Amino acid sequence: MFFPVCANPMLRKANPTVWRAWRSWKLSLHSSTARASSGSGPLDRSEEPSSVLTQKSPHTPVMLKEVLHHLDVQPGQVVLDMTFGGGGHTKAILNMVHEVTVLALDRDPTAMSLAQQLAKETFGRVKPLLGRFSELEVLLSDMNIKPGSIDAVLLDAGCSSMQMDQAQRGFSLSKDGPLDMRMDGERYPDMPCAADVVNTLDQQALASILTAYGEERHARKIASAIVEARRVNPITQTQQLASVVAGSFPAAVLYARKDRLQRPAHVATKTFQALRIFVNDELNELHAGLRAARSVLTPGGRLCVITFHSLEDRLVKRFLQGDDLSNLDQYHFSPRKRGAGKEKLVYEKRDGGMVDWLPLRRKVITPEKDDVKENPRGRSAKLRAALRR
Ligand SMILES: C[S@@+](CC[C@H](N)C(=O)[O-])C[C@H]1O[C@@H](n2cnc3c(N)ncnc32)[C@H](O)[C@@H]1O
């Protein structure tokens, strides 16, 4: 039986290994669907996946073939997956190159249990690391891994489907749950969650967060509605916040906004995004992650970074151009610095620029149309790839 593979024929010619790995991942998706629906696999037995490595991941990896192509992992190399998530990218790398070792970092203990399972099943080819980008240096030094010794690094920023789809985690706008949004609340129970932010910050600070991290044009109106609502009852549930935000707009415009696929998007989408970024200190973390990648990569090592909104992509682009982002902290909010900061990111040129990185592609890479159709969550993804000088 032929499973339609819509890979770019150029890629198939240019990099058959990547093409085969990507195809094997597609087949694994198909085989789990086929097994689930009919009970017997219609595939050629030689292509049927036999281990956890080829089982369907709980999160569909974004721009998989582009990542495999640009990381260009070779036998014997050490790869750092800084955002293990559901392990989709890691599994594809392990499938493509058998003698590779993958250091698998994630701040979320749930993702780490998947990494531990994969470590067992791959007899140690995966080394799980529980922690944040900002904790990576210490984690690696505890493992005796020296700076400049890693061959390829992947950073796939943002949230996983496992986090988004679990109402209990509080990320989802469409499923009611406690307004939490912490990726590692289990590890840091004292860290403020989204409910703490909406119930304690003053109106101006809330508006600044929505503007800075959600690029929300109606930030002041929404912040005012939040402050009004919490006077009556604290906002503790995701659906409660969604209705407070919705209540500050006329009913006719609730779904008037469109996402990039021109599908109606709820007016609270940007508010949720902004809160999540703030609660998890995502921009500072991304900056820490990029610095860590620069320090751990060997000369000639490769970096792939996937981001999902323009603030993050701008930061990555500037970092790879050699701009000095050391003052980033003072220009935006972080949970540790409540109420302090301004809304704009300001960058300064570091002398020389482009000193540390050679871009593998001049322009940002975006997902192919067919991939977006299959995985609409990846629609706003942007991939930048560079070589460490
Ligand atoms: C988009 S998902 C990665 C999906 C993964 N590439 C896959 O194929 O399944 C992002 C993951 O990065 C993790 N993450 C986000 N920020 C992090 C940080 N600062 N430090 C470590 N992990 C982080 C999240 O917990 C989440 O599991």
Image: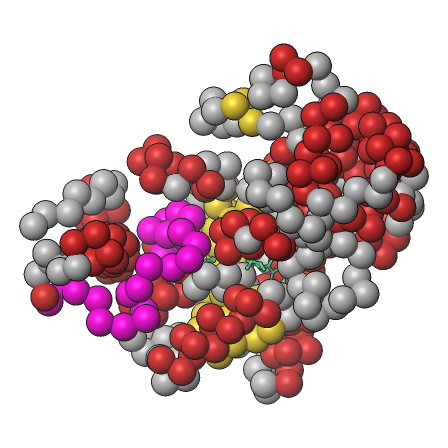
Residue 359 in sight in this render: no
Position of 274 relative to 256 (above/below): below
- Where residue 140 appears, x then y in whole percent? 61, 79
- Where residue 193 appears, x then y in whole percent? 76, 54
Position of 16 relative to 255 (above/below): below
Q: Nearer the viewer, residue 167 or 372?
A: 167
**Residue at 89% over, 49% down:** 338
- Where residue 358 appears, x then y in whole percent? 51, 52
Q: Is residue 314 left or right of residue 383?
A: right
Q: Nearer the viewer, residue 39 or 213?
A: 39
Please identify the residue farthest to the front as the structure is shown: 232
Q: Is residue 53 magenta?
A: yes
Q: Nearer the viewer, residue 379 or 37?
A: 37
**Residue at 51% over, 56% down:** 162
Q: Is residue 7 left or right of residue 378?
A: left
**Residue at 55% over, 49% down:** 164
Q: Which residues are magenta?
A: 46-68
Q: Nearer the viewer, residue 264 or 47?
A: 264
